[in-house]
Image (cartoon, coloured by chain):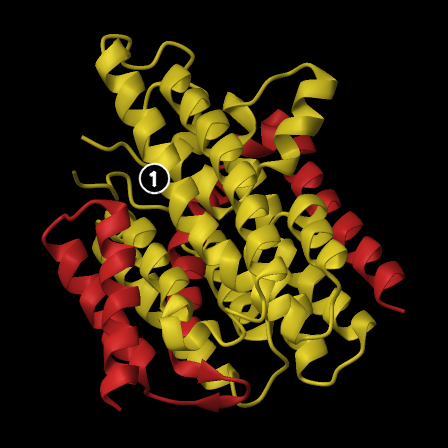
Chain colours: A yellow, B red
Amino acid sequence: MRRRGRGTGSDPVGNGDDGGPATRAVIVRDAVTIGVATGAYGLSFGAVSIAAGLSVLQAVALSTLMFTGASQFAFVASLAGGGSAWAGAATASLLGTRNAFYGLRLSPILPAALHRRMLAAHLVIDETTAMAVSRDAPHEARLAFWATGFAVFSLWNLGTLIGAVGAHALSNPRTLGLDAAAPAAFVALLAPRVTSATTRAIAAACVAVALFAVPLTPAGVPVLAAAALVIAVGAFRPPAPTAAKP
Amino acid sequence: MIWPALFAACAACYAAKVVGLSVPERILHDPRVAHVATLLPVGLLATLIATQTFATGHHLTIDARAAGLVAAGVAQAFRAPFIVVVGAAVACTALVRLAG
């Protein structure tokens, strides 16, 4: 059973009976799996960065300091398309705003101590959010967050470094099909969330809006347009009392 | 002038992450915020799937990535592990390009 709508209460007790070593092992295994997958995609990010004219150090700096894949690709794609670095920075920053909403969702389970919270903030990305919110018990959600965060951070940066250094061998990651890795990963992350008529409708509407916006707006904006749609719908339509089904 | 823009973008992205963790707790108890927070990943993930599969710059295209997406969808329908879903998409896309 998956319970949605965690944000309405921090639920400090949780299920309580579900955090044995077996569950923890599953969480860590899933985290490493996601880390390996993002590491493989990091290879292509490193290679694409070099192809766009960045140095190896700049590619790795993006993965270490920005650490949010879609924004990084937006920054690099802007340079590759002949845009200025500042245009790329603007797009990357706009795209990065979605992590604020992930943070909103994760806030109740992350540590209160300031320095640990600031460290945790850096790890608030698609993958850590997805893994954490799929766990009902808070201690499991915390483990999922940190395990996924460290696995993805390590392997994403390692992948970026190897991809950047080996850019000549991997100069066209498209031929390896690596550009299909991210959408596939998003499919795996999305599927468990599409559990109701509302979520199906939201997913379909966002796809329509984004594809309509692609020819008309700068890269990254279609994603933000979809985000604006979700916020409008979510804010003006009250949630159904039992929106979630198992 | 890549470095200054790079650092600025990194700072902005980190700031967004911190903002999300810093809003007052009471905001989380607003049912509309909770509703948005639940729906937002659904909308964004669906959007990212669509744009990263069908967009090439400002053009909409159906190419080998679409075959990869179908493979991922089939693998996911069979509840395959994450790495299998991703691997199926990468392999299928590469094969279609090889054949094309």
> What residue sits 51% from the left and 69% below the top?
A169
* Residue A14, quarter of picture: top left
Give how far across and how far down residue A196 sits, in percent. 22, 52
Name the amino acid type tagged 1.
Answer: Thr
Give how far across and how far down residue B25 sits, in percent. 61, 26
Give how far across and how far down residue A187 sits, in percent. 30, 58
Q: What residue sits right under mark 1 in the picture?
A: A33
Relative to residue B77, is residue B87 drawn left or right? right
Q: Is residue A127 visible?
A: yes
Residue sitting nearer the eye, A213 or A239:
A213
The C terminus of chain B: image quadrant: bottom left
Secondary structure found at label 1:
helix
| Disc 1: CA contacts within 10 A as few (<14), some (14-19) or many (>=20) | some
**As drawn, which residue projects farthest toward the left?**
B78
Residue A137 drawn above or below residue A154: above
> What residue sits 80% from the left and 59% below the top?
B6
Give how far across and how far down residue A141 sits, in percent. 40, 24
> What residue sits 58% from the left and 66% below the top?
A47
Check the residue under mark 1 and report the chain it is in: A
> What residue sits 53% from the left and 42% below the top?
A102
